[in-house]
Image (cartoon, rainbow, N blue to C red):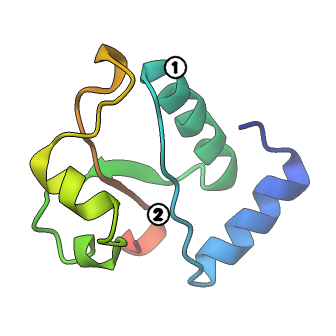
């Protein structure tokens, strides 16, 4: 993912007004690093934090596919680059999720 200035500004406005954006499917540290860098364009003051499986936001995630696999820790279908299941939220000014 590569965001231009207008895309980053538009997403920032959407998210800071209460918008929701679910991003899925990182296969390894290279893709995750790219995502972190692009998120800094959108919310430079934001912080990505891991959340536990019992976090109150977890039930919001669609259960039909993702949730059962997340709870079992078994999402790796493409090898060792993604054997750890991680769920994270982006927090920004005021601790909003």
Residue 73 % position (x, y): 15, 43
Residue at the image point whose x is 20% and y is 60% from the top: 68
Q: Which mark is residue 47?
A: none
Q: Is residue 51 visible?
A: no
Q: Is residue 63 visible?
A: yes
Relative to 61, is 80 above or below?
above
Residue at the image point whose x is 11% and y is 49% from the top: 72
Q: Is residue 1 left or right of residue 29?
A: right
Tag nearer the camera, 1 or 2? 1
**Mark 2 secondary-structure assignment:** loop
Q: Quadrant of residue 20?
A: bottom right
Residue 11 % position (x, y): 72, 65
Q: Is residue 50 left or right of residue 46?
A: left
> The N terminus appears in which quarter of the rendering?
top right
- Disc 1 residue crowd, few under 14, some 14–19, many 20+, Cα 10 Å: few
Q: Which mark is residue 30?
A: 1
Q: Quadrant of residue 15?
A: bottom right
Relative to 17, is 81 above or below?
above
> The C terminus appears in which quarter of the rendering?
bottom left
- Disc 2 residue crowd, few under 14, some 14–19, many 20+, Cα 10 Å: some
Q: Which mark is residue 92?
A: 2
Residue 3 % position (x, y): 79, 44
């Amino acid at each position: 993912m590569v965001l231009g200035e207008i895309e980053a500004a538009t997403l920032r406005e959407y998210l800071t007004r209460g918008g929701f954006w679910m991003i899925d499917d990182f296969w390894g540290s290279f893709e995750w690093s790219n995502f972190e860098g692009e998120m800094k364009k959108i919310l430079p003051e934001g912080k990505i934090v891991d959340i536990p499986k019992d976090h109150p936001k977890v039930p919001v995630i669609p259960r039909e596919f993702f949730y059962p696999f997340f709870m079992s820790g078994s999402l790796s279908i493409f090898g060792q680059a993604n054997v750890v299941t991680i769920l994270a939220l982006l927090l920004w000014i005021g601790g909003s999720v």
